[in-house]
Image (tube, grey):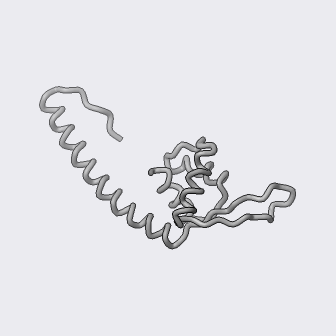
């Protein structure tokens, strides 16, 4: 799911083609070497109405590229998902803080936190 959210955020910033999306995903902490799986994600998102695409034929001498754009439905999906993620981040923060307290009190090794 993180990949889907990351793609929607990048498309909200600006429409772009799949290769460019792959390059930009690493800026959001998502594996940039997704290969064909990124295109499967994009096709799935398009079939769900979250993104739309058109062929860009303007590259002189280059092959046509499919340019993806977030739709209104995709923007709404992203807004809803963001609200859920914010709540999950808060809940995880609470759980990790409690775990650290317990680990400090019993001397157990602590997991690295980021």
Q: Residue furthest bottom?
A: 72
Return the residue nearer the eye: 81 or 101.
81
- In the figure, 2 relative to 14: above or below? above
Q: Residue furthest front?
A: 47
Point 24% across, 27% down: residue: 109
Where does residue 78 sit, x and y in percent of width and height? 44, 64
Where does residue 34 sit, x and y in percent of width and height? 59, 43
Point 87% across, 56% down: residue: 61
- In the figure, 79 relative to 105: above or below? below
Where does residue 60 sit, x and y in percent of width and height? 85, 60
Lateral position of residue 103 relative to residue 65, left or right = left
Lateral position of residue 91 relative to residue 74, left or right = left
Query: For residue 114, which quarter of the picture?
Result: top left
Lateral position of residue 7 relative to residue 60, left or right = left
Point 50% across, 67% down: residue: 74
Where does residue 104 sit, x and y in percent of width and height? 17, 32
Point 63% across, 43% down: residue: 35
Q: Residue furthest right?
A: 61
The mark total stands at 0
Query: For residue 106, which quarter of the picture?
Result: top left
Q: Residue furthest left?
A: 105
């Amino acid at each position: 799911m993180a990949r889907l959210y990351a793609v929607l955020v990048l498309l909200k910033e600006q429409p772009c083609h799949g290769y460019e999306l792959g390059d930009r995903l690493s800026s959001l902490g998502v594996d940039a070497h997704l290969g064909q799986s990124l295109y499967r994600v994009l096709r799935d998102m398009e079939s769900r109405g979250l993104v739309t695409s058109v062929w860009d034929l303007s590259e002189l001498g280059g092959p046509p590229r499919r340019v993806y754009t977030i739709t209104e439905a995709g923007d709404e999906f992203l807004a809803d998902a963001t609200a859920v993620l914010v709540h999950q981040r808060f809940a995880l923060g609470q759980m990790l803080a409690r775990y650290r307290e317990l680990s400090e009190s019993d001397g157990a090794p602590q997991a690295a936190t980021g």
